[in-house]
Image (spheres, rainbow, N blue to C red):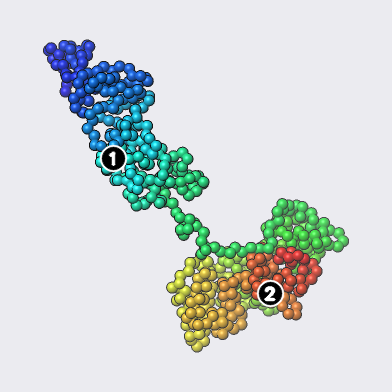
Amino acid sequence: MSYPPYGGPPGGYPQQPGGFSQPGYPGGVSMPTPESASSAAYGGNPGGMPYPSQPGGGIGFDMGGPGGYGSAPGGYPQPPGVAMPAAPGGGQATYNAGFGGAPGYPSGGGFPSGGYPQQPGGGAPGYPQQPAGGAPGYPQQPAGGAPGYNQPPAGYGQPPPGGAPGYGQQGAPAQGYGQPGAPGYGQPGGQSYGQPGGQSYGQPGGQSYGGQPGAPGGLPGQQPGYSSVPASQPGYGTPNATSYTIKDEGTLRPQPNFNAETDCQVLRKAMKGFGTDEKAIIDVLGYRSCDQRQNIKLMYKTCFGRDLMNDLRSELSSRFENVMIALLFKKDEYDAYELRRAMRGAGTDESALIEIMCTRTNADIHAINAAYKLMHGRKLEDDIISETSGHFKKLLVSMSVGGRMENQTVDQNKANADAQKLYQAGAKRWGTDENTFNMVLASQSYPQLRAVFDAYSRIANNDIERAISSEMSGDLARGMSTIIRVVRNKSGYFADRLYHSMKGAGTDDRTLIRIVVTRCEVDMKQIKEEFQRRYGKTLESFIRDDVSGDYRKILMALVGGIP
């Protein structure tokens, strides 16, 4: 409705029911009042009232009297005669749950400092003080579930007492507003999305977003709104029996409080002048890791301008010298040194070639190739080709590439197919197709090869290693058997090699020194256990009985025994 400018119609506006005169309007024109608005919304309410100050500093309607609004300290009074659907339990109706608004009440500015008064039955418009177990804004839901969004039973009344989710609500676990009874996305165990343990989002004392370990309401570090994972459920980083693997462990560990300069001074003093202090040399080099020994070698030349390896060669001799020189090499350098020694001069040490080439990882092989080229100025593959022949040469060349599929996962169908190929290439035919055995044994991962060996046993009713021994001979049979034994039990393979190096008359010192030096920091603990299991005696006792002097002392130091 529009008003004419500069005043109203002649004679002024007619007096409205329930209003009162406003000064300054021509002709006693009345303005609408809260009572007239309330009458329009809730029915008639006789009499117009002014707006006096209320006790407690609030602003409200002083309507004490018949037909008026009862005055209540600190807030708006409850309007009588409001037709509202009754909620279960007799609670008072509320409007606009969660916002506190109600028709006819001002929407902002100057609300009473004391809030709204407590209403009978626990209901109240706006933001009332709730009894224990109630929730502001949202209607209270009965235990065991919640109706759908905006569909509480019997209207918006106050439900029976009990817990309900909301902002700042604490209590027993309950489903969220509008949450179906069955657990859904992010709802572990009947709890609401983002509300673990019945506690609210960001609720003090509960688990908030990005919760810390030890906070109640969920797993350590669990974030609300994400499903809890049972501790026994696989696939979520939970340890289980199938994921447990034994870790290889060496007997020689880095020396704590290592000081390369001090060690260099001890070594120089042990070799300076007349005579040599072998015990001092053993105490230093026999109890330092490979990396620490490299630091000592570098610092020795830095401090004294001398090469440590040359000084040791001039001061030591025989097998003790061989061990100390081996300790000054890096691991890949020592393997490259031993490979060159095995192929240099008349004859070839095929056993050393097989041991090194058929037991190292891809990374080891690549490092050996680089070290071999750097140390000897020639390619390892070229020397293998010139010093070996036949299918044995093909096997060693295949191993020198370092191309085994180490990360290959087990494929049982492929394992069955490869086992069938091996059976067809060997026992099922006249003669042997060595290329098929080479292809499978040199390329597949260790876990995949174990599956192939098991499948072969079922198909051929024979063990794969026995089949190779019957189908092949010489260095080729030993090379392929070595791969099979390493795949099945690497520690057992080296335990056998150590046993045979000391068994009977004489000692294969090259093999003994090479295995002790290269495995003492890798898996010597497991090798020792396997040695005792297979032969009933400790490795230390074999070494003590087979060798002597400083040679025995340095070997005992490396394998963790008492000299």
Residue 249 position within the rendered picture, expressed as x and y whole percent measured from the top left: 64, 63
Residue at the limit of the structure toward the left, as seen here: 10
> What amino acid is at disc 1?
Pro
Residue 370 in sight from this viewpoint:
no
Q: Say which element carries label 1.
A: loop
Residue 37 position within the rendered picture, expressed as x and y whole percent measured from the top left: 21, 24
Residue at the limit of the structure toward the right, as seen here: 274
Which residue shows up at 31% across the image and 31% down it? Answer: 120
> What amino acid is at disc 2?
Gly
Q: Mark 1 packing: few (<14 Cα in 10 Å), some, or many (20+)? A: some
> Marks 2 and 1, Cα distance to the nearest angstrom?
82 Å
What residue is pinned by disc 1? 88
Q: Is residue 223 above or below residue 65?
A: below
Left or right: residue 363 compared with residue 536: left
Which residue shows up at 72% across the image and 78% down it? Answer: 503
Q: Quadrant of the N terminus?
A: top left
Residue 220 in sight from this viewpoint:
yes
Left or right: residue 499 compared with residue 465: right
| Residue 139 found in image quarter | top left
Q: Mark 2 packing: few (<14 Cα in 10 Å), some, or many (20+)? A: few
The residue closer to the viewer here, 389 or 425, is 425
Residue 536's disc is: 2
Q: Earlier in the sequence, mark 2 or mark 1?
A: 1
Q: Say which element carries label 2.
A: loop
Residue 150 position within the rendered picture, expressed as x and y whole percent measured from the top left: 28, 42
